[in-house]
Amino acid sequence: MDGPTDQLEDRSLRPLTGEFWAAVDRGELVRPVCADCGRSFFVPQFACPQCQITNWAYEPSTGRGRVYSHTTVHRPPTPEFDAPYVLADVDVEEGWHLLTWIVGCQPDEVSIDMAVSVRFVTGPDGYRLPAFAPDEAAR
Amino acid sequence: MSGSHPLNQVAIVGVAATEMARQLDTTSAEISLRAARAALDDAGLSVADVDGVAARWPGPGGTVFQPGSADWAEVFGHPLRWVCDTYPQGVPGALDAAAAVAAGLCEVALVFGGQAGVMGGAAVADYTRPDNEFIACWGSLTAAQFALVAQVYRHRFAPDPERVAAIAAAIRNAGSNNPAAVMSGRGPFTAADVLASPMVAEPFRLLDLCLATEGAAAMVITTAERARDLAQPPVAILGGGAEWHRQQYVNPPRYDEVWGLGADAARRAFELAELGPQDVDVFELYDINTYEVVRQFEMLGLCAEGEGADYLWEAGIGVDGRHPLNTDGGLLSYSHIGWGGPTLKIVEAVRQLRGTAGPGQVADAGVALVSGAGSGAQYHNVMVLGRG
């Protein structure tokens, strides 16, 4: 069971971000897109950061991107996290970015500007999360 | 020092810091009150004189808006004319208090805060674990947010690791020489010691990173006119400024957006002061990690982007160096007390300008620069202080 269980809060009910998490639970990556200027942005805000229009909607992402920065965490903030793990800021193709993990390779194989694509994983609290892995097709 | 802008009409007249330790056997409210009373004693004032409060502490105490500055009206036994709860510590707290005093909203503003009885042994401080839904799920402690910025810097400029580590060693040696520091007597440290310490979040090793400790700090700000009759030589706020890039710990900080964070605030602060960064005698900079120190010298324009570690290596950052830095041992080695941490920078700067800073005293220090937060927090603020 990868999705929310009875013990977990139903993330799909969260204001603004529920649709994002519901998509993640289906194995899809989406991002807010402004209906007016077409800009993709993240994190979800009530208004577009370019034109302040509140009329935006989630649209599918290709889930392909590049590593803007990364750090390997050796001492996690809480014991549930299994160190070492690679935190990264990934630039996604449609012009948005998010904090995530790089999985599917050794920490020392991660580099800035490396091509990556989304790979859904289960976090320590049992929720599905959109991590990224090296994108072999892009090499 | 006289000038025409409103900040010239106020002065910092009292400062205090309590004892600092990994854990203190008291409460946050009690340790904060102790710092407040000590700062008033330092100024030659009493609680009865206070008509403005900017305070923050992680409970207990306070009411429904807790913890809030107005709660101290009850403890002080009289109403207040001005309170500030937006960022009631450090540089923003001092600038807000100075503006309130200059505008006549209050006459004696007390800025104070700290923490005690809240740090849990080996666990990291809860304020270093942002709880935003797009941050917490990844196990992203605040140090890792700063690390994402430092990693791009390393990728582009490949600074000499020994020269970066030497900055942490120098600040930690200042703390080792400071009897009041949590890490007092723990040195001397070398760059090799820093590079041999355990990795936390690349590129930060344990000795690159600030403490999370307990204690409290306070400062008193009043009119320059009243300052003339008080116990200490007044310290003037020559200039100040802040930049709020975005709310902290929601989106990851981007090197290209935040490496220069504070440059505009610093430019405005030095313009008000009619001085430049080269005129600063002592720097009390927010040393949340070693790379933030490098970043701030580049942001100030004292050296080019990518050259900070080499520049500081050559300039020297000890008491006898060209840029004496974090003379109390800083957040790395003296103490970092949560919300009270930013105020510790001002306490040390004021003592430097009075000539009472102890082993870290810089000879004839006349101009001090104080800063708060940094790239990973996505806001930065600076204040130029001088003799009143």
Image (cartoon, rainbow, N blue to C red):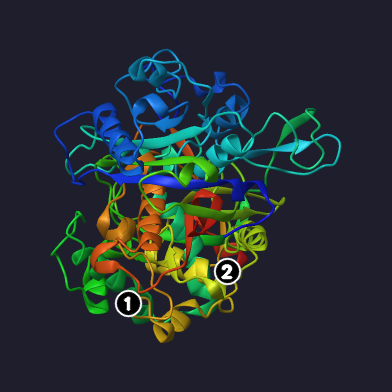
2 and 1 marks in contact (CB < 8 Å): no
Closest to the observer: B45 or B95?
Answer: B45
Horizontal side, residue B298 vs residue A9: left or right: right
Amino acid type of the residue tagged 1 in the rendering: Ala
Image location of residue B349, percent across then percent down: 40, 58
Say whether residue A28 is visible. no
Can you give x and y, in whole percent of width and height, for residue B261 in the image?
59, 58
Residue situated in front as seen by the camera: B209 or B225: B225
Find the residue positioned furthest to the right: A36
Q: Which residue is mark 2?
A: B300
Say which quadrant the N terminus of chain B sits in.
bottom right
Q: Earlier in the sequence, mark 2 or mark 1?
A: 1
Characterize the local packing of mark 2: few (<14), some (14-19) or many (20 or more) Cα atoms within 10 angstroms.
many
Q: Is residue A77 left or right of residue B93?
A: left
Q: x, y percentage for residue B177?
A: 19, 67
- Image point (50%, 49%), residue name: B377
The quadrant where residue A32 appears = top right
- Placement of A1 over or under B160, stated as above or below: above
**Circle on res. B284:** none
In the rendered image, the vertical position of residue B51 relative to residue B300, given as above or below: above
The residue pinned by badge 1 equals B166
